[in-house]
Every structure is written in structure tokens, then in C-alpha cells.
Image: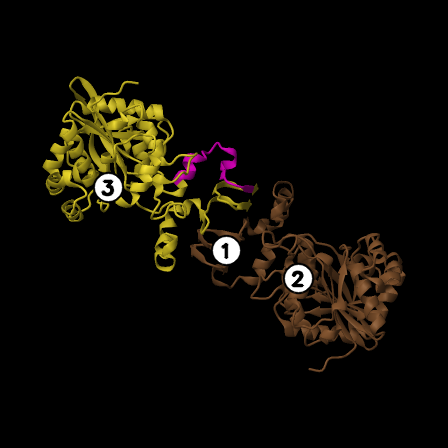
Chain colours: A brown, B yellow
Amino acid sequence: MVTDKNIYTVILAGGSGTRFWPLSRRKKPKQFLKIIGGRSLFQETLRRVKPLADPKNIFIVTNAQYKNSVREQSVGFKIPESQILCEPQGKNTAPAICWAALRIYALNPQAIMMVLPSDHLILNSSAFQQSIHQAIALAKEKYLVTLGIVPTRTETGYGYLKTVKTKSAGRMVYTVNKFVEKPSVLKAEAFLKSGNYFWNSGMFVWRADVILEEFRKYLPRIYKPVKLRAGCHPSPSFISMWSNLSPISIDYGIMEKSKRVVTVPAKNLGWSDLGSWQALSQALAPANAKKGNYQKGKVINIDSEGLFVLGDQRLIAAVGVRDMIVVDTPDALLICRKDCSQKVKDVVSLLQKSHPKLL
Amino acid sequence: MVTDKNIYTVILAGGSGTRFWPLSRRKKPKQFLKIIGGRSLFQETLRRVKPLADPKNIFIVTNAQYKNSVREQSVGFKIPESQILCEPQGKNTAPAICWAALRIYALNPQAIMMVLPSDHLILNSSAFQQSIHQAIALAKEKYLVTLGIVPTRTETGYGYLKTVKTKSAGRMVYTVNKFVEKPSVLKAEAFLKSGNYFWNSGMFVWRADVILEEFRKYLPRIYKPVKLRAGCHPSPSFISMWSNLSPISIDYGIMEKSKRVVTVPAKNLGWSDLGSWQALSQALAPANAKKGNYQKGKVINIDSEGLFVLGDQRLIAAVGVRDMIVVDTPDALLICRKDCSQKVKDVVSLLQKSHPKLL
């Protein structure tokens, strides 16, 4: 497949977090876990973009402490060392994207950038690739394009993009006019019916020059210092500059303010942000699976339903269990009711005091 | 405390079984597990009889494969080696008791024997000792005495002793006139109200000569061969004789037939047969405990109730769990809804095929 030499990929792989504790730990966050099949979410992301962009055009922004994970897991993709951008500290998405955009623009002023999280699930790669092609077409017209996932249920755990259909240069586009944070059930029901609301996936496509123009306009406090030092990483002056940045997300810093934001509604991607064990279990064991069970490892299941097990070395026997997450690791075990999986963060808080080595 | 030199104790410690899998294994059945505090149920049984009988008068009947466990766990009790009777195979309770009775009678024709299981829980030792004293008094009058536990709930998992109060030699005794197997809920309710029904505890007191007389009468097919070979264990002739015995319980073989059976109603013993994980959890975490939780090991509990955890080395985090048994061991983990704990035997059946090493 011949790819457009102007297409660049930026994979955001710096996220920390322990929502998938005890599998995810400080040194091994979600994106590097081989939860599904034999590959990590980060590796799946790399594989998904392979038909879309030259590997030489892939940039990865990560945290310095994950550099080895990135290297190990991207072996075979031949990503130039200089394109693994290591943030001294995480500063949320805007600074990371600004840095990558400056680097890409310096290489190719005609560049079009895809920006992709590395810790989401997309089961249907070809639907994803199709949506990206649509997004690229719009990005060429100087839009900031977000992929908006067409909702399939009344989900209260996601942010939504409110859109209006407008005509632009002879075609219909979905202009984003509002970012809505996690809604109530009632609102989520209305959103689902309306057809104008989409889940905010955090996947973007735009021209490097256009996003930099927006940074200059809406986030000069990020744009100016990063532009000044973008080329001198990892010098002390870069590290000092970076440590002085205030963390801010691209949504809050640019997307909610820019007038150029449109959405490509993406259907049937099999997308999930995998924000919790429950989300992962929903993604992997759909309602039509055998009694809703998902079992990995040596498992004996007697009369259990809605059971999600990630086993390790030991045998796990589950008897009469309903709607539970069981995750086994050599030094820690989680047993969690599915609808309580947001509370794994409370476990993590307690561990910070009592057993920090288990994080 | 001066003990009657005629009082002998027989502790039945040959039981196999894996109801407490994964803690109990073929090589380490329930009676040798240190489930409660630092001592096994077998050791607790030894401690309980210490004030009642001279340690020199203790006999232990066990299976040959548990001889080392018996020795290790009875260190300090100075039980003569010759009084650890090792069955070549388990043949249920009647042959074991017959053998012990013959050995004891040979030492002391005036002997009174207590026969005690080693795998039950008795929380109140002094109430137990008081009941035994009453039983000894009746045994001296040639009764076969069973300890009948005064029921405290409509329990459908136990066998019951049906009794009638009768006058005998100027005192009231509870004569047992029927053994009732696990009843329906309705029947159990009626039993609880009546005051004439008691839980069959499997604890007995009788004179050695009296029980041997009953064996001769009701179980000659056990009595005759065992009497012939009782003194020549572990010779090949003993082993061959033993292997030819048909297994039979003392209840079925003698107690249901003899006319000498009376009960001492035993109250407030804190008794449980610990027939399942649920029974153990009921015994250890009574309803008035904090949210019904019982936790041993490194446990983080967020919003869990009715949780029973026996941890091992690893940390266990339980989130939003209700009425569950969690038992962790180095090579196997059990997660079981409390009201399904009878199904642990199904796990064990499956393991026999798939992972026999875990039994």
C-alpha cells in the first residue's frame, strides 16, 4: 500500500495510571499491558496505523520512564530513535502534541498529523482506517478533525461532542459546537436518540501548520516556550522549560475554543477507552458470550456468570460467582464487583500508604 | 486436676476429604489444618481432652499416610507410639472404634472410652468438659452415650437424634429412639421447636466392655476379624484382614440398633462440624461481626460484606464483594459464593481429571 508521504502519526504513550491495578503498575501502565491476545494496546495501535502512514513518519510521545517499554514494544517498526519524544514529566496532552507538531512541521511543512492515544481498544481496524481517511480529507481543508464515536448505549462515563450538521465547501460536515463532560443517565439517553452527539475519542487529524496556528492563538503559554526549546531535548534548558509548563489537555486548551473543529462520525469501530476493568470486560465479553464469562489462564468455573478472570500461574476456581472481576498476579490479587470497578482507585490510594511496592 | 485412670480418649483422625480445598489436600486433610489461630483442629481436640484424661490414656486412630502429621502435631502430649493406630485404609468409623476398644480393653477391662472426631470446632471447652462428665456418669451405668448438640437454628445439613425422656435408675435420661438424616426445612423447624431433637455430633462415651459386647452382637463381621488380629498390627496378616473389612459407620452399624443409646444434651459448646467453607465462615464470623467479614492475611477491603478471606503471601484486594469465600494458596485460589460452598466438591472432581497435582 502506497501511503501519502505527508501523513504523520503521533502516538501518545505517556499515560500513567493504575486503573488496571494489579496488572498495571507505576512502571507498566495500561498501554504496555498485553491484556488482549499477545500484544499490548500500544502495539495494537502501531499495527493499526501501519497501512496509513510510513513507519518513518511515526512519532511517539512518552514519559522518559517508559522509553524502554516503547523501544522494546516497537521493535520491528523501525521508528527512528529521534522520533521517540520523551517528556521529562507528563503535562497532559496539549504540551505533548505541541512538541510533536513542531518537530513534524520542521521536517515537513505540508505534514498532516494523526494524533492517537495508545491505550484504547479498537476491534475493527478497517473501520478505523476508513474513518481516518475521511478525517484526512477534511484535515486537508484546514479543519481540526476529531473522530466522534457513534454512541451505541446510554454511556455516562464518556465525554460527548455536540455537533451540528453544516454545509461547507459543498459538503456536509459535523461541526463541533460543544464539549459535554460525563452526562447524567437522562442526558445520555437524549444524546443517544438525537444523532448529533458523539463520544469524544481523543483521536485527532489535522495539518501541522493549522494546529500550530491554533496553539499560537489559544495556548501561547505552551506554544512559545516549547517552540523555543523543541529542538534541544534533552538538554537541561529543555528539561527546565518543560518542568515550568502547566499541564493542560488539548480538549480544554484548543478544541473547546477553536472554530475549526469538526467530527468524523465513526461507526462499528469496536471502540472502548478501557477506562476501567468493567469497560475492558464489556469489550472482551459481550452480552452474547457464553454466560458473559471471559476467562484467561487456568480457570475452573462452576455456575459462574458474568465472570471476568485474568489468571496468572495459579489455578483459579470460581464457584457461583456473579459479575465479578478477578485479576491474579504474583504479588497481588483483585476481586472486584464489576459495577464497583471505579473503586480500584481507592485500593490504589490505600496501597500508597500501606504497600507502595505493590504499585 | 486428678483424672480417673479408667478414662481413655480415642481421637478419630483418619478422615480424608477435600471440602476445604484448596487449603485441604489429599496429604493434609481438614483436621491437620491450622485454620483457626495457630493450632489445627486435631491439636485443639487434644487440648480439650487434656483435663479429662491422662495423655497416657489417649489413643489416636488415623490413616497410615497421616502418621507423620499426627506425630508432628501431637509433640508435647507424650502419647505412646503404640497408641497411634494407623489404619492401612479408611473403613469408616466402626472398624476404627472396634480396634481401639479392643486395644483399650486389653490394657484395662474397666476402661471408659470417649470417642471424639478431630475435625470439628468447639469454641467452649469448659461446656464440652461438663457435658463429657455427665456422659461419663451415664456410661458407667452401661449406656452408650452420644453428645447431642441442642439445636440453635433450623439446620438442614446435619443428622438429628430423636429422643424421648425416660426414667432410668431414678434419673431422667434422653433415650435415643431414632437417627434422622438431613431433614427438610419444615422438619428442621419442627425439630427445633420440639426440644426432643439434637444434632448428632459423633462424640461418644461408653465402657469398652459394653461397646465390644454390642460389636459382638450387631457387627460380628467387624468384631471377629479385628479381635483376631488387633494385636498384630502392622503385620501382613493384619493388613490383609483390614483390607477385607467392609466400611461401615458406628451410627449405622451399632447406634441405630443398640437399645442402650442415650444422649447428653450439650448446650453452648460453640460446636460446628465444619462441613463446608460456609460452616467455617459462620463459626468464625458470627452475624454480629463488623459487616460479617472475616479476614486473615494481607487484605484490603473496600465496601465488602460477608467476606471470608484466608490469605496467603499475596495481598488480596476485595471491592464490593458480597457473601464470598476467598481462599488463597501458592498454587490455587478459590472464590466461592458462600451459599455454593457445597459445590467445592465439584471443583475437586474436575481437578481429579485436569490437575490431580492440585489435590
Q: Is residue B39 above or below residue A87?
A: above
Depth check: give the residue in front, B33 or A4.
B33
Q: Can you give x and y, in whole percent of width and height, for residue A214 in the image?
A: 86, 64
- Identify the residue at horizontal 50%, vertical 63% (top origin): A289
Depth check: give the residue in front, A247 or A337.
A247
How far is mark 2 from mark 3, CA to CA?
59 Å
Q: Can you give x and y, in whole percent of width and height, for residue A67 in the image?
A: 70, 61
How far is mark 3 from mark 1, CA to CA?
45 Å
Q: Chain of mark 2?
A: A
Disc 3 on helix, strand or loop? strand
Depth check: give the residue in front, B171 or A94.
A94
Q: Can you give x and y, in whole percent of width and height, for residue B328 in the image?
A: 47, 47
Left or right of B80: which side holds A341?
A: right
- The answer to which quarter of the image holds residue A111 is bottom right
Label 1 near label 3: C-beta < 8 Å?
Answer: no
Left or right of A150: which side holds B113?
A: left
Q: Can you give x and y, in whole percent of width and height, for residue A129 in the image?
A: 68, 74
- Residue B71 in sight: yes
Which residue does the numbered mark 2 point to in the structure image?
A69
- Identify the residue at horizontal 23%, vertical 34% (top origin): B83
How far is mark 1 from mark 2, CA to CA?
30 Å
**Span highlighted in magenta in the image:** B279-300
The amino acid sitting under disc 2 is Ser
Q: Residues within 10 Å of mark 1 (few under 14, many from 20)?
A: many
Q: Residues within 10 Å of mark 2 (few under 14, many from 20)?
A: some
Disc 2 on helix, strand or loop? helix
The numbered dot on residue B86 is 3
